[in-house]
Amino acid sequence: MMSTNLPEDGPIAFLNGKQIPFHRARLPVYDLGVMQGATLTERLRTVQHRPYLVDEHLDRLARSITAVSWNVPFDRNSFSNWIHQLAEINSRGLPPAMDLSVVIFITAGQGLADANGEIDVSQPTVCVYTAPLPFPRWAAAYREGVQLFIPSIRQIPAESLDPCMKHRSRLHWSLADQQARSAHPQGMALLLDQQGGVTETSSGNLFMVRKGTLWTPLAATTLPGIAQSHVIQLARSMGIPVERTRMTPHEVMDAEEAFLTSSTYCLLPVSHLDGHKIGTELPGKLTRRLTSAWSNEIGLNFAQQAQEIATIQ
């Protein structure tokens, strides 16, 4: 066990603007986040205990709030201050190599008809908290790659839920990943759209490499990933061409290499799709170049970090 200098009650969180011990952060059963999964969310990470890509996540959160037209009673500065306070307080006593995820979620409010008179006004629930990054789970994936599987469940059409929103209406993802894990214990679902095109996974965006070019799915069918955008910018600055296009499962299987991007694990190589091996080496050449460039940019080898933490937890 690693010792920390956290507050006596453990990690803290912010719930509806109030700082409280994390263990007291609770939602009533009649909150619409519980009842309907009506929840917007963002998840970022710290890098050497400092919040990373905060502005980009808050920009996307603002777009999500605008898309749902909820009257959220806190402004951008509040969210930014909470993120930085939580990172500073909840990282106390952690070794430099140990980082956290920082989570924001906002629900649509409360279901008054189910509140049994507890409240008479509904307003969005706003919470910000931290959690340890799951380095032991990622460590093997950095070495061995992620095994992706295409489930029977399809991506929710944009006509039903705009993919620009990051939300927690995620029963379809739970069922899709359940199918993937039935094929492999660490399997991850890769959803197709209604026309059979590749979209994304529950944790990140997909890239494949063909003839020295990076390919990633169209924005119309996937969440605009913060890490995805960062990798596109990084690749172009390195002279690596990037294309956004409709991708088929067969094209991914025939790719020279593939990887996933996420704000938390940054970049994970993909080894297989539906049992078909992708490429001839793992990680692939371009995956290694981008991993090295990103690690140099932030002053942290995130793949090595996962290996180190996994050995002491």
Image (cartoon, rainbow, N blue to C red):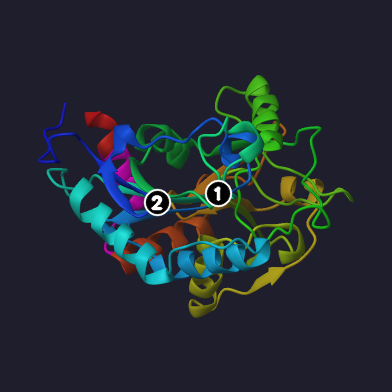
Q: Which residue is label 2 attached to?
A: 16
Name the outermost residue toward the right: 195
The residue nearer to you, when weighing 277 against 150, is: 150
- Magenta span has 301? yes
For badge 1, the amino acid type reads: Val
Quote the CA–CA distance across marks 2 and 1.
15 Å
Which portion, as a residue range, is magenta?
299-308
Image position of 107 (left or right of 197) = left
Front residue (pair 181, 14): 14
Q: Is disc 1 placed on a helix, strand or loop?
A: loop
Residue tagged by mark 1?
121
* Residue 191: percent from left, percent from top: 74, 43
User: Which residue is nearer to you in this view: 64 or 30?
Assistant: 30
Is residue 188 visible to us here? no
Taking 20 as reference, is 274 above or below it?
Answer: above
Q: Nearer the viewer, mark 2 or mark 1?
A: 1
User: Residue flagged by tag 2: what amino acid is it?
Assistant: Asn
Q: Tell me where residue 240 sits by quadrant.
A: bottom right
- Which quarter of the figure has residue 95? top left
x, y percent for residue 57: 47, 64
Which percent across, then down, holds residue 143?
A: 43, 39
Magenta span includes 219? no
> Dominant secondary structure of the magenta stretch?
helix
